[in-house]
Image: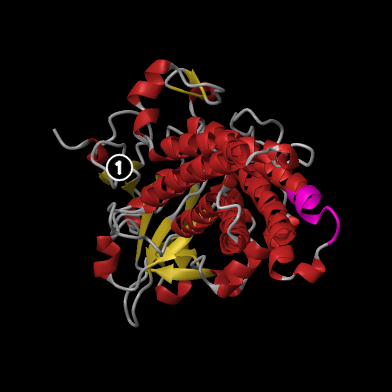
Amino acid sequence: MPPRNRRFFTREPFRHDDRLTLQHAEGPCGFLNPTRAHFDHSKLCAGSASNEIATPQESGDDAEARRKPPKQDVDSNVPARNVRFLWRSRDNRKGRHPLLVQPPLAGEEAPFVTPRRTSHPKEILKTVIKTFTHYPIWDISWLVAFIFTWGSVVWVINAFFVWLPVVAPSTEFDGEITDGGGITAFIGAIIFFEFGSILLIFEAINANNSGCFGWAVEQLVDSESNGSPKLRVVAARRHCHHHHQNRRNFVGKASSATLAEARPDSDSVDGKRQWQWFPSWHDLRTHYLHELGFLAGCAQLFGATVFGVSGFTALPGINNHLTPQWRLNAAYWIPQVVGGSGFIVSSSLYMLETQQKWWRPAPHLLGWHIAFWNLVGAFGFTLSGALGMAYNNSGAQFEAGLATFWGSWAFLIGSYLQLYESLNKHPVEEVSSMEDFAAVKG
């Protein structure tokens, strides 16, 4: 029997969708569920742009797109030689639908038309603008990123309160460290860590289990190529049944605008509700305890809960009454070390989830960079707690404040990238050669 990471023992994506066929699944750890898979779409296979599909189905977005071409830049659609749909556990959890394309070389046939790669400067600028203008509060993935981003801002302010008086004593004002630092630490620990971490667990246990393609495939006639048919792949909200499509509630039901063919039967999967507050013991044992995203979320929640103790004891009136030193260490500094260690484990697992092999980094993926910067921040907060216990050492106190400073900025970078990720639901990745295209297996 193949290792667990080579096949879906439970909840195989697209198992009820005849259009998508599983070709390959893999994950970084043999005893955990697959974190990535490659699916062939029946219309996107080689040679599919032929007369065999000269009369495609017209429904929903397909038919509407024929009547009203989408308003977009002339350069936003580009030719492609090969197209592949990728499934990744993190992308699926965030409601994203990654597409892999290979552009044609000069003189090569291009049977497909796809959106341009999302790493294009214009696409990056569009998403950056959306991070300041778009607020989909009904999307739990966006809400997690939004809370983490503002929580990180609070921690950056806290770092200035704590570190600046040490490096520049002349700038200190009354109550800067005890009041300013203590209150911002309390707010940051509760908003950034505890509440955001709880939402991470809800996001993990309510991940889409049936698989969601999220694209529409249309047939076009290219008049410049003697009328040879082409297939255009376009992002289609009505073909997506992730929870973020429903703007009217926060319980994960598919939007009423979702096409019937893309909607899970009776808004359920295998007879279970799409949204759940707590998984059953059977689901925990057979599925979630083998999911890297769920395990990382549990480590994050554990770290946040312990770290919350130091956030509470940082409040003025509590922190300055924790004497002698061992009480301050036990109630304030040690919870920072334990909680920060939980964040290190969580960030490491999130990084691992994005990698093909446990030892091979994946810097080409946005999710990997998010986890990497959060890992840097976690080390900063852990180091701050460890150095803070050396109360009589001025050098250690300086380094403790500095670790909070750069750790907070690292968390802010990772959180903003996560906010960017939550608004980029249809990423298009591009490879230049057929060897690279064949080498990417989800």
Q: Residue furthest bottom?
A: 106
Q: Secondary structure at mark 1?
A: strand
**Magenta-colored span:** 173-181
Q: Residues within 10 Å of mark 1 (few under 14, many from 20)?
A: some
Counting from the top left corner in percent of width and height, residue 404 is at 61, 57
Viewer-side residue, 263 vs 378: 378
Q: Residue at x 37, y 65 (%)?
A: 111
Q: Main secondary structure of the magenta part?
A: helix
Q: Residue at x 36, y 27 (%)?
A: 287
Q: Residue at x 72, y 49 (%)?
A: 135
Counting from the top left corner in percent of width and height, residue 352 is at 36, 49
Decide whether residue 203 is among the magenta residues. Answer: no
Viewer-side residue, 169 vs 85: 169
Q: Is residue 321 visible?
A: yes
Residue on which disc 1 sits: 21
Count the marks: how many? 1
Please, is residue 81 above or below residue 270 in the view?
below
Counting from the top left corner in percent of width and height, residue 59 is at 54, 42
The reply, left or right, for residue 293 in relation to residue 77 is left
Q: Residue at x 81, y 63 (%)?
A: 172
Viewer-side residue, 407 vs 207: 407
Q: Amino acid at mark 1?
A: Thr
- Quarter of the rendering containing residue 283: top left
Viewer-side residue, 352 vs 425: 352
| Quadrant holding the N terminus | top left
Q: Is residue 11 visible?
A: no
Q: Residue furthest left?
A: 1
Which color scheme does this rendered protein use? secondary structure
Counting from the top left corner in percent of width and height, residue 308 is at 63, 37
